[in-house]
Amino acid sequence: MECVVQGIIETQHVEALEILLQGLCGVPKERLRIHELCLKSGPNLGAVASEVRLLCDLEQPEPTWTVRHVGGAMRGAGAEQISVLVRTVVESKASKNVLRFFYTLGYKLDHELLRVGFAFHFQRGAQITVTVTSVNKMLKLHATEEAVPVTPGIQLVEVTAPASSDNYTEVVAAISSFCEYLAPLLHLSKPNVSAGVVPTAAAAAASLMSNGGVT
């Protein structure tokens, strides 16, 4: 399973966020260019629809593929009281023929996206990953070079960390603690519960740029 929170930030403040993350994480960033294909099962595969995401890493010299299935979120009184979403996730590396394989099984392409940006991976009470990406849609099938932003001027920020049924409370605490450092620039919450752009972002970004310099 994994713990996750999301938020949005205006593109003009992304450089300031990068400076802040670099200082907090102390590790170099990783560039991201991910072609994401969302597939849904057809009626021949059962009454309950199944969804999988195929992620093609275009930053690699030879593009690599990952199959990702996001399951249900943790429920109950405990889940409602925490600000981090805890959900089941299964990932597996795959060959370049994976799309053809799922088509053969009866899956259909629902939509595809291109995520472009950067990520930081670091240890801070948990193995945390922060991604900052522009989410783009394709105007033609698989035409990644012609992708256009879904929300121009806005980028998606996601903080995730792997967890288990034995340690998720510690991971939730680690993510919540880390997110407090980012609060002047953006608000992070459970996916689909976005609070929008933070009013203090412009002032916080200006302060970070003046103190951190332009990199």
Image: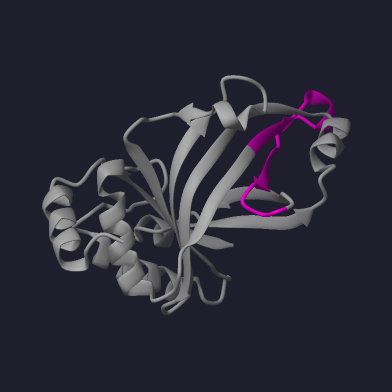
At 46% from the left edge and 55% from the top edge, which residue is drawn?
118
Can see residue 179? no
Let me know if residue 27 is in the magenta part. no
Is 1 situated above or below 54?
Answer: below
**Viewer-proximal residue, 90 or 159?**
159
Question: x, y percentage for residue 102?
Answer: 82, 37
Number of on-image labels = 0
Where does the magenta region start and end? 37-61
Question: x, y percentage for residue 179?
Answer: 31, 64
Let me know if residue 47 is in the magenta part. yes
At 86% from the left edge and 38% from the top edge, which residue is drawn?
101
- Relative to 22, 163 lies left or right: right
**Viewer-proximal residue, 124 or 40?**
124
Can see residue 113? yes
Screen quadrant of the C terminus: bottom left
Question: x, y percentage for residue 78?
Answer: 41, 62
At 52% from the left edge and 42% from the top edge, which residue is drawn?
115
- Relative to 111, 171 lies left or right: left
Is 86 situated above or below 56?
Answer: below
Quarter-of-image position of residue 11 = top left
> How are the residues colored?
one colour
Is 41 situated above or below 66?
Answer: above
Screen quadrant of the N terminus: bottom right
